[in-house]
Every structure is written in C-alpha cells, then in structure tokens.
Amino acid sequence: MTAVRRLSLVTDEGPGPAPERPKGALRIAIATQDMKGLNAHFGSAKFFAIYDVTPQGSAFVEAVSFGEVSDESGKHRTEGDDKITPKVEALKGCHLLFCLAIGGPSAAKVVSAKIHPIKVPQPSSMEEVLSRTQSMLKTAPPPWLRKVLAEAGVSTAKPSFDDED
C-alpha cells in the first residue's frame, strides 16, 4: 500500500483539514518531483501541489506526498500493488490535473473521479501553470473547460455570438 501524506501550511490555529474551496475557484493539482515545477508523470510523481485558482489569483492549498511511486518503466507491478487508486483518492476534489504524461488506465480512473487530466508537453514552473490557468479563466474558456467549470459550480460568462453594433 502506498503511504500518502498531506502537507499544508500551518497557521496560528494549528494544522487542519484542507480549506474549503473559495467560491469561484478552480482546484488544480500539479504533478511534481520537487515542488518547484510541473515535472512529473502522473504515476511517478512524488508530490502533487494543489492550488485554488481564480481569474484574479491563486492560493496554495496543500501538497500530497507519496511514499512509493512507479519507475516509469511501463511494466505492471504484481497483483494487489495498486499505486494509482491512492493517488486518485488523494486528488478528489480537484478539477484539473496537470502532468507530463498519464497512461490510459490511469486517465480513466482520474476522469471517473471527475478530474480532467491535462498533459503538458514539457516541464513548466508552477507560476507558468498557474498563470496559464488564470488566463484561460479570464478569457473565453474552451468548451472542455466550461464543462469542468460548470461541474465545479463556477459560473463563467458565455461567449456571445450576437452582433453588437
């Protein structure tokens, strides 16, 4: 069984559960090996940095850490050695998952948990991912993101196709 640890900011009130998602925020997870950038495949990520993102800004929520990860060899482990389900369970409540790669069975589990996986072609800094997400929220989001936003209870202005003179 994979050991899952949740790391969050500690305040004067002490540690607590992950904060509620602010109204209008999209909760995203970023696959990372070092908490510095998006630089991991889903199955081999040592951490997932979780943020709440709005068009105006972003806030760190928590980091989820895993004791054991895959070696990216593409070979299946022995029966009963499920590394994916604990990761998907740990990410419940997130709307988007950014990673360098994700296999078909893993993607299916992520999608069934109502998390939209996004493969990014090359490593990026956390700031780049957050900024890109904010930009998508500020402008007319693509149809797939509008669907995610609707499921998350985040309202967006629908594009108008009427000619305004």
Image (cartoon, helix red, strand yellow):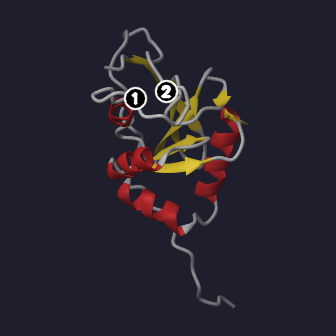
Q: In the rendering, at what x and y percent does residue 135 appear?
A: 66, 53
Q: What element carries label 2?
A: loop
- 146 w.r.t. 165: above or below: above
Query: Alpha carbon of mark 2 to alpha carbon of mark 1: how far?
Result: 9 Å
Q: The N terminus appears in which quarter of the rendering?
A: top left
Is 52 rendered above or below residue 105? above
Q: Is residue 72 visible to us here? A: yes
| Snapshot quadrant of residue 41 | top right
Residue type at tag 1: Arg
Query: In the rendering, at what x and y percent does residue 134 appear?
Result: 62, 49
Q: Which mark is residue 77?
A: 1
2 vs 1, front mark: 1
Task: Please say if the residues under marks 2 and 1 sit with CB atoms less than 8 Å apart.
Answer: yes
Q: In this view, does 88 lie to the left or right of 119?
A: left
Is residue 50 left or right of 134 when viewed as pictured? left
The amino acid at mark 2 is: Ser
In the rendered image, residue 42, in percent from the top left (x then y), is placed at: 51, 36
Figure check: 1 above or below 133: above
156 or 81, which is in the foreground? 81
Q: How crowded is mark 1: few (under 14 residues within 10 Å), some or many (20 or more)?
A: few
Q: Can residue 23 be seen in this view?
A: no
- At 65% from the left edge and 46% from the top edge, which residue is drawn? 120
Q: Which of the labelled discs sits on residue 70, or is there none?
A: 2
Per the rendering, the mark at residue 112 is none
Q: Which residue is drawn at 58% across and 43% down?
A: 101
User: Which residue sits at x=56%, y=31%?
Assistant: 72
Residue 65: give x, y in percent of width and height.
Answer: 46, 20
Which image quarter holds the C terminus? bottom right
Above-or-below relation of 157 to 56 = below
Name which residue lies at 36% across and 16% down.
3
